[in-house]
Amino acid sequence: MKEIVDLEGMGYTFELIGEAIHYSYHGDGLDPAIACPLINRLREKKFDGISFLKARNKPQLPIILVIEDIPEFLKKYNLKVVDFSWPEGERPNLIVEYG
């Protein structure tokens, strides 16, 4: 969620306690003209914020797929390769992330 990511970049931290979003500021030189509209949008989209924080806090397991057309698959699902290995005599291993 853009509002949470932007606020974190400014020095805010977020914690989900039950169904409540708790936040605090730990940065230097807060600009209320930028932060306040983001906080207000986060309040308006509270349930989106809760879903975002829940999803981000879940451990993500690796998914193993055998893919015949790797470049097309990466393009179709907007994935980028973040790590790569090709063990001798085996298929290449790609670690990808969305975006």
Image (cartoon, rainbow, N blue to C red):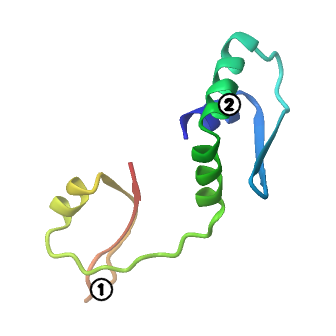
Residue 52 percent coordinates (x, y):
59, 50
The front one of 75 and 40 is 40
- Residue 30, how many percent across, how many down? 79, 17
- Report x, y in % for residue 49: 62, 44
Could you tell whether 71 is left or right of 29 in the image? left
The residue positioned 21% from the left and 53% from the top of the image is 75
Instruction: Tell me the amino acid under the disc marked 2.
Output: Leu
Counting labels gives 2
Q: Which residue is mark 2?
A: 7
Determine the residue positioned at 69% across, 35% down: 8
The front one of 65 and 45 is 45
Mark 1 closeness class: few <14, some 14–19, many ≥20 residues within 10 Å: few
* Residue on which the image places disc 1: 88
Q: Which residue is at the front of the view, 61 or 52? A: 52
Q: Could you tell me the amino acid type at mark 1?
A: Glu
Outermost residue, top side: 33
Which of disc 1 and disc 2 is earlier in sequence?
A: 2
In this rendering, the answer to whether 85 lies above or below 36 is below
Is residue 95 placed above or below 90 in the rendered structure?
A: above
